[in-house]
Image (cartoon, helix red, strand yellow):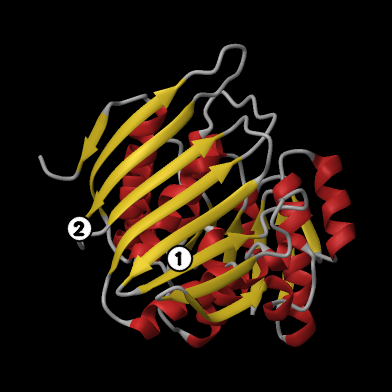
Amino acid sequence: MKMCLIGCGGMSSTNHGPSYLRYRESNPSFVMAACSDLDPVKLEAYRAKFGFERAYTDYRKMIETEQPDAVCVIVTEAASATVGNAVLEYGVPMFIEKPPGKTSRETLRLVEAAQKHNVPHLVAFNRRFIPLMKICRAWLDELGGAVYYAHYEFFRHGRNDEDFSDTSIHAIDAVRYLTGGDYEHVRFNYQDIPGKRPSNVYMDASMTNGAIAHIHVCPNAGVVIERATLHIGDSTIILHLPIWNDSYDIPGSIVMIRKGEVVRSMTGDQVCDSSEVYLTNGFYEENKVFFDAVQSGASMPSSLKEAYQTMLVKEAYAQKAATWSSII
């Protein structure tokens, strides 16, 4: 399988490049044919570091010349829709980083292009692919029934983003993944902290399957954590994700409690053979799922169509809307 990459920046270098190398170790037919970036110095350094065969400053020329089996788009939020649409027009299976576009309108155009050209694709909401998160979803499936309550904490420190929703979109998507429902109604409560930006945001959501969810986003807390608490039947699952190297919860953990007794538990180092962030945070797994599906023809999870509603809620948050509803 022949792969091409667009975007050789920090996220690509730290998490995706190492994922490609690990995938190639167990898949010798995987060819890292070419990479592309507008910065020729950065481009050549990336090519040499990860062993791509060729480098291009023009991604269209790269695709037309290389005729790849798959293209990975790891560019900025501002560029993702333009580049993503171009890749879809070539009809090549596409992996695209989140968010897929800066606005819901840009995402909708990507949805339409993917449908028009019938292109397999995967949107890289990496929380869905974190090993502990996948175990959580599997435990929920084994329990059966529906999650009736979800609480998700998304805390960071020292953030000064103009638009933190580009990051906290992960929490919005994770709640959809864990509850198995779409958003029906969301109420937003914004809390401005003197001398700090961006605002804290507290979301109170009703899901289409009846679940209630509370999402707390605090960009300037004292700690980096992502934690989920889920109630299903007479069981509660508590999930602590090992986000980044400075997470308080490294290596992460998951526990199931029923009627006051722990019935199952695991730690992150029991499910992942390395503490490397690209493995513990799901980057390798999302790439593996994509490349495996390209080769086998299997359906791909985390589609642009799925991402569209997440983008609508994220956009309402970014615009400081009081509420959002799927019901017009």
**Element at label 1:** strand
- Residue at image mark 1: 121
Where residue 3 sits in the image (x, y, percent)? 65, 69
Q: Which residue is depicted at the point 42% across and 45% down?
A: 215
Q: Quick check: 187 left or right of 311?
A: left
* Contact flag, marks 1 and 2 (Cβ < 8 Å): no
Question: If the image is split into quadrants, where does the C terminus sit?
Answer: top left
Q: Is residue 275 above or below residue 10?
A: below
Q: Quadrant of residue 40?
A: top right
Query: Percent position (x, y) of residue 288?
Result: 62, 75
Which residue position holds label 2? Answer: 208
Q: Residue at x 46, y 69 (%)?
A: 237
Mark 2 crowdedness (10 Å alpha carbons): few <14, some 14-19, many ≥20? some
Nearest the eye: 18 or 93: 18
Instruction: Point out the tag, 1 or 2, that comes first from the N-terminus.
Output: 1
Q: Judging from the image, what secondary structure is the residue with disc 2 in?
A: loop
Q: Which picture quadrant has residue 285?
A: bottom right
Residue at position x 37%, y 80% in the image: 141
**Camera-side residue of 72 and 271:** 271
Query: Can residue 68 be seen by looking at this rendering?
Result: no
* Rendered residue at 51%/47% (across/down): 153
Q: Position of residue 36 (x, y in %)?
A: 71, 51
The amino acid on which the numbered mark 1 sits, given as a three-letter code, is His
- Front-most of residues 68 and 130: 130
- Type of amino acid under label 2: Thr
Which residue extends farthest top? 195
Image side of residue 120 versus residue 206, left or right: right
In this rendering, is residue 284 above or below 109? Answer: below
Image-quadrant location for residue 39: top right
Image spot of residue 323 (x, y percent): 25, 32
